[in-house]
Image (cartoon, rainbow, N blue to C red):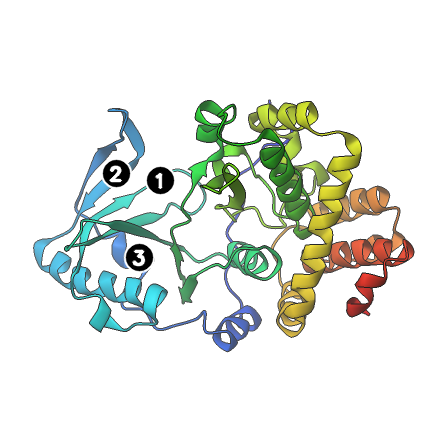
Amino acid sequence: MDPYRPQLKKPSFPIGDNLRAYLRKYRRERALPITYERLRGFIEAAPLIGADGKASLWESVVYDRLEMEALNEDLKYVYALIRVDGDLSFMRHLYVDRVDYCAFGNSAPFRVRIVNAFNDNADYYYVKRADSSRVYGLELEHVLSPNRMNYLTCGTTLVEEHIAGLPGDVFIRRWLDNPEIRPIRIAKELVKFNERCFVRLLGDMRSYNFVIVVTPDFEGAQVRIRAMDFDQQSYEGRMNFYRPQFFKDNQPFALFCMQHLNLESAQQYQREEQVLMLQRASLSEERLALLLATMSRDTVSTPEHVASLRESLAEHYQRNEFRECSSMGELVQESLSAIRTRMRGKGNLELTMFD
């Protein structure tokens, strides 16, 4: 058994009043014409065949004809809310091509395929059960990572945009040794992604839970790694669960970094990402402070997991302040404080902006 896999299915935590107020403040909570439970009312389902000719984990679902007519317009409006703040004048040429359902995973999501009638270009978005730990994960990604996250909540429903990219497991099989990408660029991004997940306590980043975005450049392709599954934000009590390098599924990536990076370079890229995270935190200081204060008062894990994780982090950082934390939100806050303090101790004058 893989010691870094979740041992039990993570429970769902409802969105509380304080988090709901935060979401309203930053226009994440919106009135939506569809709900997760409404999409559960399909009458038939058929396995969706993938590009390889095999049945995927997804099923295409069918609704009653009258319901489907109403759903089409409502699903288009939700897409308009995500993309253009609800302006349907830019969406008249779009249509709903398909609604898929996946029973795999904690969120059991629906995937909506939207197609442009003029050029057949397709886009997707997802409808899931709202879960507070997942929402905290999305919001921390938005504030502390280089990626902007588009999502909306409405009661017990969560709507997320599609995150485009090659799933990590597919990248390992098809692209890891591609000569068009310099190995050092892949290794550098893996180190930075690993550090970002660890500091903000995003767990379960196995290779199929993140994507790699490849961008052609004049000196070979650039890459960026993006998380796409936020179910395991600050839930587990094992520290290495928040370090992607330790998952069996990610072993090819870990070996790749060892092959192409020396220790000094890895430490450099780790420090670069720490500085960038603190800069992002500084730019969104008020928002992040409110988010972490809300998260600190919320329940997104068990007392046992919090106690186990704070002890491991205290030993890792050699910082007793972790032992005073009583929630996952406080542990995330203390992780940011720990790297800020370490940098100040090194005498880095460029960090005075964080004083």
For disc 3, the marked residue is 37
The extreme front residue here reads: 218
Residue 273 % position (x, y):
69, 49
Residue 239 % position (x, y):
72, 40
Which amino acid does the dot numbered 3 rest on? Glu
Q: Nearer the viewer, residue 172 or 62?
A: 172
Which structural element holds mark 2?
Answer: strand
Which structural element holds mark 3?
Answer: helix
- Image height check: is 327 above or below 290? above
Residue contact between numbered discs 3 and 1, judged by CB atoms under 8 Å: no
Residue at x 52%, y 57% (from the top left corner): 138
Residue 2 shows in the view: no
For disc 1, the marked residue is 103
Q: Does residue 321 appear to the left or right of 192 in the view shown?
A: right
Which quadrant, please, contains the C terminus?
bottom right
The quadrant in which residue 137 appears is bottom right
Residue contact between numbered discs 3 and 2, judged by CB atoms under 8 Å: no
- Image height check: is 211 above or below 151? above
Q: Identify the mark nearer the N-term, 1 or 2.
A: 2
